[in-house]
């Protein structure tokens, strides 16, 4: 059975190693996760035409009323499940993407949209 001193020592070693690793390989400020970066690429290819390059709903009005402004607080308030359902099923003026985007791509787009709604 480990002693209290041994447990404390191992805990301190773990903390010191963790700090050294984080110092040795700091994340760059403003760096994007791979998922958000992938989502940005997919968004630019499939969504920006209507939603605009910044997601403000200022793209082309191809399918009817103006596209959703994804930077509004209402988007931030919607659950991930609701937004994924919209991506998958579409809306009256938005096509369904469930047969065109993989689940991973849909989730990446969602991750990117979450960065717009800040």
Image (cartoon, rainbow, N blue to C red):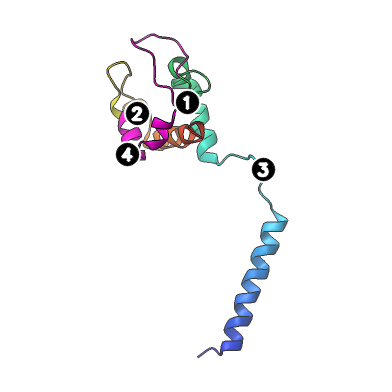
Residue visible at 56% across and 88% down in the picture: 4
Q: Residues within 10 Å of mark 1 (few under 14, many from 20)?
A: many
Q: Is residue 44 above or below residue 105?
A: above
Left/right placement of residue 44 relative to residue 11 reads left
Counting residues from the start of the chain, the first of labels 2 and 3 encountered is: 3
Left/right placement of residue 94 relative to residue 36 reads left
Alpha carbons under labels 3 and 1: distance apart: 23 Å
Left/right placement of residue 95 relative to residue 31 reads left
Residue 92 lies, in percent from the top left, at 27, 17
Residue beneath disc 3: 29
Alpha carbons under labels 1 and 2: distance apart: 11 Å
Residue beneath disc 1: 43
The region drawn magenta spans 57-86
Alpha carbons under labels 2 and 3: distance apart: 30 Å
Q: Quadrant of residue 33?
A: top right
Counting residues from the start of the chain, the first of labels 3 and 1 encountered is: 3
Residue visible at 35% across and 39% down in the picture: 79
Residue visible at 39% across and 21% down in the picture: 68
Residue 73 lies, in percent from the top left, at 43, 32
Q: Residues within 10 Å of mark 2 (few under 14, many from 20)?
A: many
Residue beneath disc 2: 87
Discs 2/3, front: 3
Residue beneath disc 4: 81
Residue 1 lies, in percent from the top left, at 50, 91
């Amino acid at each position: 059975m480990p002693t209290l001193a041994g447990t404390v020592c191992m805990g301190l070693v773990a903390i010191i190693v963790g700090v050294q690793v984080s110092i040795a390989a700091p994340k760059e400020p403003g760096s994007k996760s791979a998922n958000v970066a992938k989502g940005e690429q997919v968004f630019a290819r499939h969504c920006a035409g209507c939603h605009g390059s910044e997601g403000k709903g200022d793209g082309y009005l191809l399918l009817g009323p103006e596209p959703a402004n994804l930077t509004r607080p209402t988007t931030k308030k919607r659950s991930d499940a609701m937004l994924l359902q919209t991506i998958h099923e579409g809306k009256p003026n938005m096509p369904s993407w469930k047969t065109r985007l993989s689940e991973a791509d849909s989730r990446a787009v969602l991750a990117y949209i979450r960065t717009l709604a800040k």
